[in-house]
Amino acid sequence: MNEDGSVSFPEPGARIHGTDPFATPGVARSPVRQLRGRLASTVTLWTAPGPAGLTVSSTVVAGGEPGRLLGIVDDESDLWAAASAAGRFAVAPLAAAHKQLADRFAGILPAPGGLFRGDGDWTGTPYGPVPAGVGTWVGCRLDGAREFGWGLLVEATIETIEVGPDESPLIHFRGRYRELR
């Protein structure tokens, strides 16, 4: 209640919390987690036939003939089940306009009707669906995976590459999305 006795309501879309109330406080995080948070990473969307998908910020591309791709994914994710069954998957770097898409596939935002509903159309590929607005993506053949930390280190061979316009990538740094300008 305001000083004058009136009641004001928050703006539509206002947040209840300014921060994640379930997040581990910075002082309680392990030194490894604190170090990882200080290494900026491009946010990517991994998808597989099924369809299934997962936001992944632990992705590395290695040059060579053929090119190779490494990533760390959750071994209990729907993405891993679908990618390991199909033996292939797609990876698309996301841009600043894709924050909600990234949050949805990370399990942070609700996905009424499923992960692949909303946020525009999808382009079907043999490797998995790719968001229609994303111009750059790779199709990978799964070579193997092994336990690595609290996830799986996935190794793959790049079989196809689509390189679209040069967009500013969505970056994950210190627990938040950032944009390069």
Image (tube, rainbow, N blue to C red):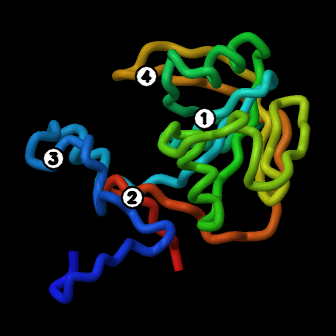
Viewer-proximal residue among 136 and 45: 45
| Rendered residue at 34%/22% (across/down) | 149
Q: Position of residue 122 (x, y in %)?
A: 85, 46
Counting residues from the start of the chain, the first of labels 4 and 2 encountered is 4
Counting residues from the start of the chain, the first of labels 4 and 1 encountered is 1
The residue that disc 1 covers is 54
Distance between the alpha carbons at the discs numbered 4 and 2: 21 Å
Counting residues from the start of the chain, the first of labels 3 and 4 encountered is 3
| Rendered residue at 29%/57% (across/down) | 19
Characterize the local packing of mark 2: few (<14), some (14-19) or many (20 or more) Cα atoms within 10 angstroms: few
In the displayed structure, 178 sits above or below 68; it is below
The residue that disc 3 covers is 25
The residue that disc 2 covers is 176
**Amino acid at dot 4:** Gly
Q: Position of residue 181 (x, y in %)?
A: 53, 80
Which element type, helix, strand or loop, lies under badge 3?
loop
Distance between the alpha carbons at the discs numbered 3 and 4: 22 Å
In the displayed structure, 127 sits above or below 176; it is above
Distance between the alpha carbons at the discs numbered 2 and 3: 14 Å
**Amino acid at dot 3:** Pro
Which element type, helix, strand or loop, lies under badge 2?
strand
